Image (cartoon, helix red, strand yellow):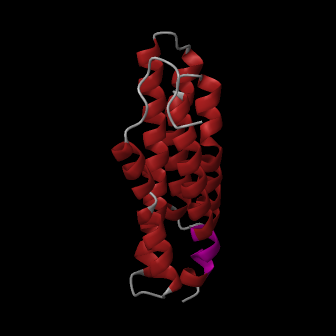
Amino acid sequence: MDGHNSTSQPSLSPAARALGYAGLLPQILCIAMIVTEHEWRYAALAGGFAYAAAIFSFLGGVWWGQAVQSGRATTGAYVLAVMPSLLAVALFLPWTLGWEWPGPALFYLGALILGSPLVDRALGFAAPDFLRLRWHLSLGLGSLTIALGLLAPRVIAI
């Protein structure tokens, strides 16, 4: 395909695509700070979790907006739309309670982000070009977030 869909919905602009991919940069920066043992590596680990959690919550907002815009959403669509925010907060609780964190939370969060385009597909509200971009960005951010989880022991052990 040429990146344009054949429906009446306009294709994503080059700016939307570029800014979408630029959204991977914060996670890449966090990983670089940890790998180079930067003095702010623990802040980078926490920031990477916060960024991934914010983006995951944002996806719920996207689903909510698409559901409202469609005019054909069921209650289930709205339930799915609020889940990312609730899950992101739940994954933050171990850190606030002093339990093992952040590795396991980063793994779960990364996996949820990796699978999030399946929700887009199931809801059926996303335009094809948007869904294609969602797959790219979710595979990128989900994988980078899991990589942060793998790097977490390096930060915690120091």
At 57% across and 49% down in the image, what residue appears?
136
Q: How many marks?
A: 0
Looking at the image, residue 35 lies above or below residue 7: below
The quadrant in which residue 61 appears is: top left
- Seen from the viewer's position, the closer of residues 16 and 114 is 16
Instruction: Find residue 72 and report its horizontal and vertical position in percent.
Output: 51, 10
Q: Which residues are magenta?
A: 148-153
At 47% across and 65% down in the image, what residue appears?
27
At 65% across and 52% down in the image, what residue appears?
111
Looking at the image, residue 39 lies above or below residue 79: below
- Seen from the viewer's position, the closer of residues 110 and 130 is 130
At 52% across and 14% down in the image, what residue appears?
73
Q: Is residue 150 magenta?
A: yes
> Can residue 101 be seen at all in this image of the molecule?
no
Q: Is residue 132 magenta?
A: no
Q: Quadrant of the C terminus?
A: bottom right
